[in-house]
Image (cartoon, rainbow, N blue to C red):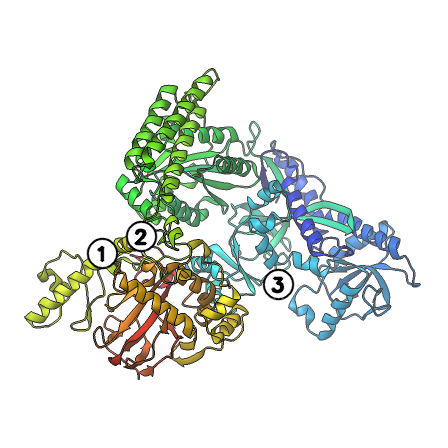
Amino acid sequence: MASPVLSKSRPTGQAWWSLTRLYQGLQNYLLCPWSRHPSPAASFSTSSCWPPSSHTLAEAKLALSDAWPLEDNTPSTDYAAALAAAHNEYMKRFGSDNGHAPRVCFYCFPDDFLEMDQCHIESALRRLKVPTFRAFLGAKVTLGDASTGGTLLIDGVEASVVFLHCTFCPEHFAHEGEWHSRKLMELSRAIKVPSLLGHLAGAKRVQQALSRWEELSRFLPPEDAGRCMSVFVAQYDPSQPASAGAVENALERPERWVLKPQREGGGNNFFGAALAEQLRGNDLSQFVLMEKIVSPSMPAMLLKAGVATSVEAVSELGIFSAHLAVDHEILSTVGGAMLRTKASSSEEGGVCAGHGAIDTPLVVSEVGGQGGAHAGQIPAEKCLLLVCGLPGSGKTQFCKALADSAAKFFLVTTWHHLSYDSPSRTERETISNRVDALLTAPGSAAILLDDNMYSSITRAHWAQVAIDKNCAFHQLFLKAPLDLCLERNSLRPSAVPDFSIRYMAEVFEWPQDGTWEGQHSMMLNAQETASQQVDSFLHHLPAAKFWERVRPPDTALPRKDAHNMDLDLRKIVSLALKDAKLPKLAMPVLAKQWSTRKAALVAESQAKASAADTSALRHEMVETFLRSCMADVSAASAASPSKQDGPDKDLDKEEVSVLGPPFRWLPAECGCYFTDNIYARLVDAYFKVLNPEMEAAEFWKVNDREYDAATRSQIFAEAVNTAKRRKEAPQVFRKNLSTVLKQYRPKHPELFLRKADVRVPFPPSQAAEVFKSGFLEIWEQARGGKELGAKHVHDSCHECPFLSDAFVEQLKAELRHFKEQKLPHQQPNSMNRNGCILNEIGLGPLMDRMIYVYLMPVCRALYPDLLPGVDSHHSFIVEYGPNMDTNLGVHDDNSEVTINVSLSQDYSGGELVLYHRARVAHPQKLEKKPYYHRTTHGTMLLHPGELLHEVLPVTAGNRQGLIIWLRSDAFRKKHGCPLCQSTDRLLYA
């Protein structure tokens, strides 16, 4: 039976045309100027011509008043015309200059069950006076003059055009002869359908690349690219670290994904459990991971061998096209379509394999005619959702979770998350234009517009857009306490000034019950997790309501008058001057500047008061004023005079974020950091401190172990003090870093990089001074995908050269210089009391560069399973000696991979003892034979963080080392925190 295709109006073919232009543009880009290439061969171009006649008869009997009559579908005739044009072009250029009579060759495999499909095209070519012949896989293929660009002879017949119906899957290249024949075809002057690069242009890996805007927009104008993007699903290369999140999602929910190998033909894809098993394998580079297209099903009758079966079915529409170009475009046509319908329960849809059936598209009105069979029953294709709340209320996390979870409930896979929170009016206008393009593009889509939206005027604008576009419309509000928003904002890499959040909180116009806006709004608890918020949303807004078209209100939407505007401007100035933490000299300058700007805006508003509606203009003026004040405060903060004049004075002018990019520096990654694994050196054991204020009796109830009274008292005091120190550590970290940036005068300023420079390698000459030559060789091997020259010494432990002797001495001299200035700093970690945290004393950017540019390629080559990505690092110096910590007990590390760099060699004892990989509550219980390791000056040892190890007592001299803990959000989200093995309390992953 014919399957309906929804459209707002009689189809114009714009979406089809955009996709066709994409293919043509891609071929023009891939192929050299002298290549000639109609689009590749497609099956069922003839079979697709037959169903319309029977379906047209059924349509007449059903008398669907809102359906357009089915037009003739003649892809085989159109294909024949394109092949004829190619043959004629060949004859015009070469004719019969060698005595042969050139023909169009149908190159097939023996016993091709689509032979009758091809015969119809041959018949149409004969009517066009174009000679043809058939040849089969294994035929004798030669070049007439045995050189590139020569005449192609297949079984002795010159081919003007070779129409390839095989050579698209491994089975067609069983022998070397088939490869050689295909190579000769490509080297010949015959027109290939498709050419080799034309074939590759339609390959799955290219499809995956073109699903990204930056690639797609290279071949299509923005308008056409937008049309295509509106109907694309996400595609990933599962072998790439950047796809780790998608792979993890596919392992958790394999029913929402399909894994496609890089080959043609049906029956090769992986679904469900088979997909998950394949993703756990090693060689993933041959696959494309794609979100499964979720289509609405409909009743259908599938006819097979004379037997009709009633099923719930889904359909796939394909468009036939042809393109011929020699230096310039000669022919470009869109020639018919094929609709393939299959049971919705079937993963595969191949017609030849018996899974699907050839169908006919039936175009029906979206609204429906009076009394029509579908009148009033078809929902909106677009939904606009406003996600509103203060900065820090969790809007972005909710949007990501909703787009990730809701597609299967609302039968839409295209979710667009747009953040409207930009200070630039130009950028905001760009977002507005983007929303308009998405609402008018073909296909269904949900647009999540994420902004503060504290004013009902702003929301009314978008409500009117939804009304004008006749789409669905909803508002979601995350109502969070002001203190929570301020706290979250303070943790952001680029926090907004607090006064702006306080202002929005004071003037936020929440929707009122019983109003039109209230009926289209939903409140979410901002203190719930994003997944809990999504569950609430799905419960409140089922699919039928989600797609319900918005109806205009009975009364006018809200407006802002001039008096309210003046009050808003005054409130912004008052809060900004009160809240901004700026030098006293800067405040009068800003106050005068804002007062002048406010007066100008009020005068402009009054001058335009005669306009029909100045409400939106006034609100925009308030928004502009607020954002300009925010920018002024940020600029004034950045330009505050430094307390130093040394060579590193620029460090204080840069806003340095301890939360990235590219890496986070804070030691805390999980909530258990503050309560669990509290180390007591006295007994070399770990304890829990649920609250630093807990009483001793409660502490020993939680930690049920036997010690004498005096030991218990000392353990309790040490554990509670450690817990307090950990609780304060993030704040102390920030404070110490700020102090260092303002007061420290470096001995070697070149070690103190700017954040903006951390992704840039050292110049080659400087890199040769920083690193040992052996390390640079290993680094190049890692970047080139070659086997690494690192030495394997123990259970997943590797040793290799790293820092040059000169650089080690320079770094140690800087550390001594820092200690001499007696600036505040914390101990490296819970177990080491001597040393410092490099991220805290201003050397974080230096470590960022070393990790981002140099260590990541090496570590990911050695530990691909442990490091799908690096999101944070804790880099510190440890020291051991007779007058300090002499040893370190058995432990594992709070890292996925640890790098241990030796900075000294004049000491006795202090061997590093390596045991086995294990995350255990009591690491002192050892099971395997130890390995004693001692590195040389500047050499590094890399090992999994879960490897149990210890440092034996140093008996003479001082032992100094650089330790780098590398951490991965993707790994922890999947496997949990290394210390508590739970994902429930992760702070960032």
Residue 689 falls left or right of residue 524: left
Residue 93 falls left or right of residue 169: right
Residue 543: x and y, percent?
A: 43, 41
Alpha carbon separation for disc pair 1 and 3: 55 Å
- Report the residue marked by disc 3: 263
Front tag of 1 and 3: 1
Three-letter code, disc 3: Arg
Residue 649: x and y, percent?
A: 38, 52
Nearer-N-terminus badge (2/3):
3
Q: Is residue 372 or residue 757 the one in the foreground? A: 757
Front tag of 2 and 3: 2
Q: Quadrant of residue 668?
A: bottom left
Residue at left 11%, top 68%?
Answer: 714
| Residue 981 appears in the picture as rendered | no
| Residue 93 appears in the picture as rendered | yes
Three-letter code, disc 2: Ser
Q: Is residue 91 or residue 743 the one in the foreground? A: 743
Find numbered disc 1 in the image and state the secondary structure of the residue it sits on. helix
- Report the residue marked by disc 1: 727
- In the picture, which quadrant includes the C terminus? bottom left
